[in-house]
Image (spheres, rainbow, N blue to C red):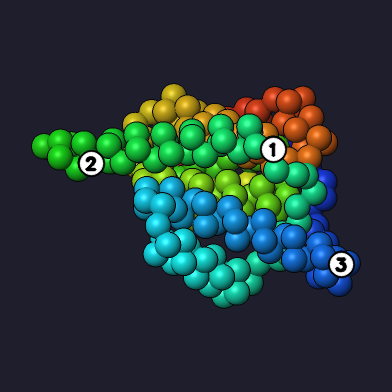
Amino acid sequence: MRPDPMTPAEPTEPPSNATLTPAARRRNRITAVIFLVVVWMLLWGTLSWANLISGLVVAAVLLAVFPLPPVTFAGRIHPLGTARFLLRFLSDLVVASIQIAWMALRPGHVPHSAIIAVRLRVNTDLNLTLAAEALSLVPGSLILEADRTTGTLFIHVINVDSLDEVEKFRRGVLELEERIVAAIGSPEEQRRVRERPPPPLDLEGAAA
């Protein structure tokens, strides 16, 4: 097995609930709920009490049902970075929806799919979770698996016909990670994203 050019970002093992103070646990839960609700409302495209309440219910169910480790939040919310992330996410959502609708209406077109492995540069549970949620909510991509040890997302993508399109999608995921880190990342995480170049494309990680 050839060596991986990138080592996992620390920490590779998240802190347990026992090592977190009650205030830290509350802050982590609140942060996760806020971002899940925001993404849910962007998905519906309407600001209403019904969408807000349903988003809170969905976020509560996700955090309660799935056996996820405690998601730590070491940075702080950056308003400008958060605004850029949300605007770009909304734009990607609209563009992807139009592309999927057009693909469904094209006569005789048989779309190809691929499973693409993308290794993130900031290997934290929060970054992995938010990137996975954002990708899954955009039509045309779905998270199949997330490897917490290496910070790798395995994504099923439709309408991928060449290795160039695989590479384009992979770089788009890394750009999404940059926007997430710019929105809520710590200075150390932002430095890590700036200084670590994207890893080379692993052809074994993409299967047509």
Residue 193 % position (x, y): 72, 31
Q: CA distance from mark 1 to mark 2?
A: 34 Å
Task: Answer above or below: position of 130 versus 61.
Answer: above
* Residue type, numbered disc 1: His
> 79 or 173: nearer the eye?
79
Circle 1 residue: 78
Q: Quadrant of residue 28?
A: bottom right
- Furthest residue in direction bottom, as rendered: 65
Circle 2 residue: 101
Residue 2 visible at all: no
**1 left or right of 86?**
right
* Residue type, numbered disc 2: Ala
> 175 or 25: nearer the eye?
25
**41 left or right of 103?**
right
Task: Answer above or below: position of 148 versus 103.
Answer: below
Q: CA distance from mark 2 to mark 3?
A: 47 Å
* Residue found 73% across the figure and 40% down from its top: 185
Task: Answer above or below: position of 66 versus 107.
Answer: below
First reached walking from the N terminus: tag 2 or tag 3 = 3
* Residue type, numbered disc 3: Thr
Q: Residues within 10 Å of mark 1 (few under 14, many from 20)?
A: some
Q: CA distance from mark 1 to mark 3?
A: 24 Å
Task: Answer above or below: position of 79 versus 55.
Answer: above
* Residue found 75% across the figure and 44% down from its top: 76
State yes or no: discs 1 and 2 in contact (Cβ < 8 Å): no
Circle 3 residue: 21
Q: Secondary structure at mark 1?
A: loop
Q: Residues within 10 Å of mark 3 (few under 14, many from 20)?
A: few
First reached walking from the N terminus: tag 1 or tag 2 = 1
